[in-house]
Image (spheres, rainbow, N blue to C red):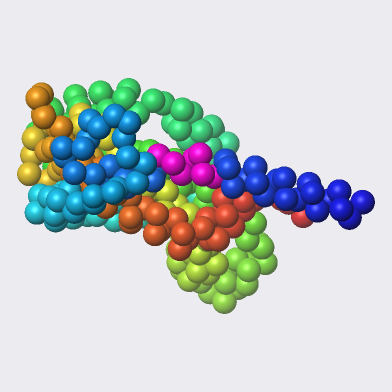
Amino acid sequence: MTASRAVRSRRNTVIGVVLTAVMLFPVYWMINVSLTPQQDMRKSPPDLFPLHPTFTGYRAVLDDQLPYLWVSLLIGLSTVALTLLLSAPAGYALAKLRPRGGGLVGMVLLIAQMIPGIVMAMGFYGIFLNLGIMNTWWGLVVADSTIAVPFGVMIFTAFMSGIPDELISAAKIDGATTWRTFTSVVVPVSRNAVVTVSLFSFLWAWSDFVFANTLDSGGDMRPITLGIYKYIGNNNQEWNAIMATAVVASIPAAVLLVVAQRYVAAGVSAGAVKD
């Protein structure tokens, strides 16, 4: 029985390693191409390893793409701030204050998550064009927040529903107002939900292409998802620079996922089990 279990464990490990390698191969190939000289791009068969690595693509990123990276960082952090500012109080209200029509609000938020991004982008295009706010970074913040806020409200609602009512009652007995109870008691114990919502909001804003491509037609404050087009032309594609940009742009997201993974697991699963 023990031997059979050991064989099964080794088999599962091998399967897991193979599947992980298959899923990570595109990431490896992106790095490989970013180090491949331009003259070797059309080599057949291609080199599986960068035999003659070059860092011209990464030098191009440092020379050309840093402004776009800073804009993406500005949009991402601003989206996180706006999302938390709107979704945390809304989640608390739905979870603990239980306003009339709260169930309908929850249903509307769920439906909002199902609307395709391109449909929302077309609506924003008409609104932004009439208001004269096309090609603005804060316009992209507002657009990206429309995706992040409904998700954030649902996460906060699920998490805050698990906070003991006795904790909130104790704060009220001590004379705390509803807002003071929220800021001084509820928010500090909702750290996992805050990290989860912040992470997903940042990743959505950082990787956004639909809103950026629709609402920015050539302004100076362009995110990295549009900055990469600097290397794509009708007759020329600088693939090592393109892939180097993709590698550099992936680093913040990868670091955040690794650092925040345990908070995200707790935040997403909150409210799934009731006593």
Residue in the picture at 30% in, 48% down:
50
Q: Residue at x 15, y 32 (%)?
A: 237
Judged from this view, the residue extending furthest toward the right is: 1
Magenta portion: prevailing SS class: helix
Give residue 231's position: percent from left, percent from top.
13, 37
Place of residue 8 in the rendered image (x, y in percent of width and height, measured from the top left): 78, 46
- In which quadrant will I find the C terminus? bottom right
Residue positioned 9% across, 25% down in the render = 235
**In the image, residue 33 above or below residue 119:** below
**The image quarter in which residue 33 lies:** top left
Please state the horizontal and vertical placement of residue 193, each as a whole percent of the image: 51, 57
Measured along the vertical axis of the image, is residue 217 above or below residue 191? above
Judging depth in this view, the residue of 45 and 114 nearest the camera is 45
Position of 136 relative to 55 (above/below):
above
Q: Is residue 272 visible?
A: no
Q: Is residue 118 left or right of residue 137?
A: right
Q: Residue furthest bottom?
A: 174
Tag count: 0
Observer able to see residue 174: yes
Q: Is residue 202 left or right of residue 261?
A: left
Image location (x, y in percent) of residue 120: 31, 27
Q: In the image, what residue occupies the spot 44% across and 41% down? A: 25
23 magenta-colored: yes
Choose between 260 and 236: the one closer to the eye.
236
Tell which of 27 and 273 is nearer to you: 27
Asked if residue 112 lies in the magenta stretch, the reply is no
Identify the magenta region.
Answer: 20-26
Q: Quadrant of residue 183?
A: bottom left
